[in-house]
Image (cartoon, helix red, strand yellow):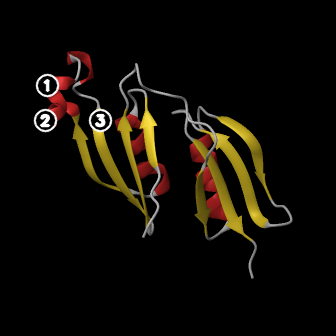
Amino acid sequence: MQATPYLYFKGRCEEAFKFYAQNLGGRIDAMVSYEQSPAAAHAPTEWRSKILHTRMVLGSTVLMGTDDMSDRYREPKGFAVSLVVDSAAEADRAFRALSQGGTVGIALESNFFAARYGTLVDQFGVPWMVVCQNPS
């Protein structure tokens, strides 16, 4: 069994996943628009180029996402995508990239439980937690 985050966007899914792939080293292995699917007939004309489903491999995990039609979209809250990295340098790089155009909640720093820990909401509205564990 595996739990996989499924992220909802208000029309910026393709842009977000391309940003994540470029800045986090992920590989997009599926990206299907509404117009490329049987859902095209049920999507408003201006929404047909938006993403119905995408899948990105990120290390040993997967992120998936969609553009949720405007009348159903809800701002994400009550969770964060936790990005666990192997080094403080990688935490610094990832946090810097994800925070571009976003809002930092907790500045990335060392603390009692992690070599680096910080939180932010990225430019696409997705909450993130970046963690580099203390060496054991």
Using residue 76 as the reference point, say whether residue 20 is left or right of it. Answer: left
Secondary element under disc 3, as helix, strand or loop, is strand
Neighbor class of circle 3 (other Cα within 10 Å; few <14, some 14-19, many 20+) is: many
Q: Is residue 119 above or below residue 131?
A: above
Indicate the position of residue 89 as horizontal and vertical percent values. Answer: 66, 63
The image's mark for residue 51 is 3
The picture places residue 31, in percent across and down from the top left corner, at 26, 45
> Spatial distance from mark 2 to mark 3, Cα to Cα?
13 Å
Q: Amino acid at mark 3?
A: Ile
Residue type pointed to by label 2? Pro
Residue wearing tag 2: 38
- Mark 3 or mark 1: which comes first in sequence? 1
| Residue holding disc 1 | 41
User: Label 1: few (<14), some or many (≥20) within 10 Å?
Assistant: few
Q: Which mark is residue 54?
A: none
Q: Are marks 3 and 1 in contact (CB under 8 Å)?
A: no
User: Looking at the picture, which amino acid does disc 1 mark?
Assistant: Ala
| Rendering quarter of residue 39 | top left
Viewed as shown, does residue 69 lie left or right of 42? right
Please name the residue shown 40% across and 21% down the image.
Answer: 70
**27 relative to 37 in the view: left or right:** right
- Tag 2: Cα neighbours inside 10 Å, few (<14), some, or many (≥20)? few
Q: Residue at x 38, y 36 (%)?
A: 13
Q: Are marks 2 and 1 in contact (CB under 8 Å)?
A: yes
C-alpha gap between disc 3 and disc 1? 14 Å
Residue depth check, mark 3 versus mark 1: number of the one nearer the observer: 1
Q: CA distance from mark 2 to mark 1?
A: 7 Å
Quadrant occupied by the C terminus: bottom right
Which residue does the image show at 22% across and 25% down from the upper left?
Answer: 48
